[in-house]
Image (cartoon, helix red, strand yellow):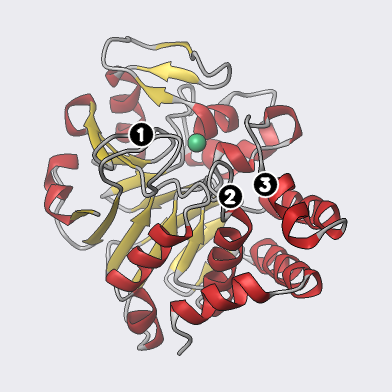
């Protein structure tokens, strides 16, 4: 078993060849994931999971390696995964930008995926977006050049390639749907999730998955002040959950002062798993719960939402 502290040590001492190799191997691994992979079923960019075992869900990290280290150690993920327990570690995306350790957070998340490919799910956030939907500020390329000099630019292009293989959604049968941003408001089938990256930009599913936010005062959708994605109302959430036959949406994307927030009368749980500048939130939070547990709504998950 590799302790997480060892992964962190490697993240700081890796050279450009080692970092490049990790990116290429993980991109290959993600590209090969189709069909039944352990207890997961993968089609296109959709991951379907059975309601068995534990799940840890991690919100935006934005370059905060200390918070990642805290939650991996505190949840005992590596110990349990090494013992081959039924456990999933699901990242909601937005691993980099804003924090000082973006390259090291990507390194650590990709290393966990390599070590436990059937137990780690890497979702795509808007900071891992495609060329026509880039997030700003985007300081990952600068951080990579600071770490690796001129080769940082080549590594940045490689990691952008890897982003296109990240998954877009996890649906846990009868329980919940897990995505970075928001509801694809006109999605009418699972295929719209599986193929959202391909139908972009003809459909808005992909953009809305990466960029949208819930609004308590909106019916239907409205343009988002972010300049991409939409604001969506409780009616849109209800329709989406109904279509997927699940009870709630778990998502990240929004900074929240207490690390988590419940919206749309318990239909949405928002997680934010990083601390420090520029938000200076009092708490970050991650979710660690049993997928077999009967879920009524996001309030059922409050006891399993760990603030730190
Ligand atoms: Mn985001």
Disc 3 packing (10 Å; few <14; some 14–19; many ≥20): many
Sequence-wise, which precedes: disc 3 or disc 1?
Answer: 3
Viewer-side label of 3, 2: 3
Tag 2–tag 1 contact (CB < 8 Å): no
Label total for image: 3
48 to 118, vertically: above or below: above
Sequence-wise, which precedes: disc 2 or disc 1?
Answer: 2
Name which quarter of the figure residue 70 lies in.
Answer: bottom left
Residue depicted at 28% across the width and 43% down the height: 259
Q: CA distance from mark 2 to mark 1?
A: 18 Å
Q: Is residue 101 left or right of residue 27?
A: left
- Between 163 and 14, the residue placed more toward the observer is 14
Label drawn at residue 140: 3
Disc 2 packing (10 Å; few <14; some 14–19; many ≥20): many
| Residue, disc 2 | 45
- Between 61 and 261, the residue placed more toward the observer is 61
Q: Report x, y in % for residue 32.
A: 68, 67
Sequence-wise, which precedes: disc 3 or disc 2?
Answer: 2
Residue depicted at 55% across the width and 41% down the height: 98
Q: Is residue 123 left or right of residue 154?
A: left
Disc 1 packing (10 Å; few <14; some 14–19; many ≥20): few
59 to 278, vertically: above or below: below
Q: Report x, y in % for residue 285.
A: 28, 50
Q: Is residue 298 left or right of residue 78?
A: left
Viewer-side label of 2, 1: 2
Residue depicted at 79% across the width and 69% down the height: 16
Secondary structure beneath dot 2 equals loop
Q: CA distance from mark 3 to mark 1?
A: 37 Å
Q: Report x, y in % for residue 118.
A: 49, 73
């Amino acid at each position: 078993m590799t302790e997480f502290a060892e992964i962190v040590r490697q993240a700081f001492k890796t050279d450009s060849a080692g970092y490049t190799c990790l990116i290429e191997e993980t991109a290959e691994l993600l590209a090969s994931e189709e069909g039944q992979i352990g207890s997961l079923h993968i089609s296109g960019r959709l991951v379907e999971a059975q309601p068995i075992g534990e799940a840890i869900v991690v919100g935006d990290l934005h370059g905060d390696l200390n918070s990642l280290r805290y939650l991996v150690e505190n949840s005992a993920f590596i110990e349990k995964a090494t013992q081959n327990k039924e456990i999933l570690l699901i990242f909601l995306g937005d691993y980099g930008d804003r924090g000082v350790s973006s390259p090291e957070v990507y390194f650590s998340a990709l290393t966990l995926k390599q070590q436990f490919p059937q137990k780690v799910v890497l979702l795509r956030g808007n900071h891992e977006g495609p060329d026509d939907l880039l997030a700003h500020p985007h300081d990952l390329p600068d951080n990579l050049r600071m770490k690796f000099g001129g080769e940082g630019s080549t590594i940045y292009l490689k990691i952008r390639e890897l982003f296109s293989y990240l998954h877009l959604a996890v649906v846990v049968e009868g329980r919940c749907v897990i995505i970075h941003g928001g509801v694809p408001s006109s999605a009418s089938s699972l295929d719209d999730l599986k193929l959202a990256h391909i139908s972009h930009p003809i459909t808005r599913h992909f953009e809305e998955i990466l960029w949208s936010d819930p609004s308590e005062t909106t019916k239907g959708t409205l343009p988002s002040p972010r300049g991409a994605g939409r604001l969506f109302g409780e009616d849109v959430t209800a329709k989406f959950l109904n279509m997927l036959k699940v009870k709630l949406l778990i998502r990240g994307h929004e900074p929240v002062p207490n690390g988590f927030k419940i919206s749309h009368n318990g239909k949405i749980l928002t997680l934010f798993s990083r601390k420090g500048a520029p938000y200076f939130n009092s708490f970050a939070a991650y979710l660690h719960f049993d997928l077999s547990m009967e879920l009524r709504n996001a309030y059922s998950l409050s006891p399993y939402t760990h603030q730190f």
